[in-house]
Image: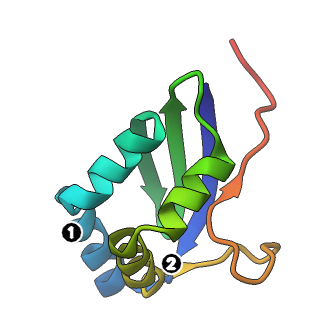
Amino acid sequence: MRYCFALDLKNDPVLIAEYEHYHEAIWPEIRQSMYDAGITVMEIYRIENRMVLLMDTADDFSLERKAEMDAANPKVQEWEALMWRYQEALPYAEPGQKWLPMKRIFVL
């Protein structure tokens, strides 16, 4: 299955560069947590401070199970807290909500 999410970065070139630097070599524990949850491919694209995340998953992947796994993993929690320094919720996000799911409106 494929998922697509959106999120903004704080509109600061220095912070954006730092964020990209972290993603050039994500922590091994973060990479492993993604694989363990059933994520097979993840890509993040950026234009200015808007990001789009594409995520392909195994057939048995569950967003709820991934959230539970992340909540129980101290290294993932550390990574998420660090990344939140750079990220900015979309204007219509609920409090505490980060990546928002996007609605697919066209397929060729």
Q: Residues within 10 Å of mark 2 (few under 14, many from 20)?
A: many
Is 48 situated above or below 11?
A: above
State the residue in front, 80 or 22: 80
Residue contact between numbered discs 2 and 1, judged by CB atoms under 8 Å? no
Does residue 105 appear left or right of residue 80 in this picture?
A: right
Along the viewing direction, whichever of 8 and 31 lies nearer the viewer: 31
Mark 2 or mark 1: name the one nearer the start of the chain: 1
Viewport quadrant of the N terminus: top right
Q: Exactly how many numbered labels are in the figure?
A: 2
Badge 1: residue crowd in 10 Å (few <14, some 14–19, many ≥20): few
Q: Is residue 38 toward the left or the right of residue 79 in the image?
A: right
Residue 46 vertical position relative to residue 97 in the rendered view, above or below: above
> Residue 95 appears at what percent x and percent y?
77, 83
**Amino acid of disc 1:** His
Q: Which label number is shown at residue 91? A: none
Q: Residue furthest top?
A: 108
Q: What SS does tag 1 mark?
A: helix
User: Regarding mark 2 in the picture, which secondary structure is present there?
Assistant: strand
Closest to the observer: 15 or 43? 43
Q: Report the residue at 27% width, 75% height from top.
A: 17
Quarter assignment of residue 19: bottom left
Q: Position of residue 78 (x, y in %)?
A: 36, 80
- As drawn, the label of residue 21 is 1
Residue 14 lies left or right of residue 60; in this view the side is left
CA gap, disc 2 to disc 1? Answer: 14 Å
Q: Is residue 89 left or right of residue 38?
A: right
Question: Residue 23: percent from the left, percent from the top?
Answer: 27, 61
Residue position for label 2: 87
* Amino acid residing under circle 2: Gln
Q: Quadrant of residue 7?
A: bottom right
Pick the residue in front: 49 or 95: 95
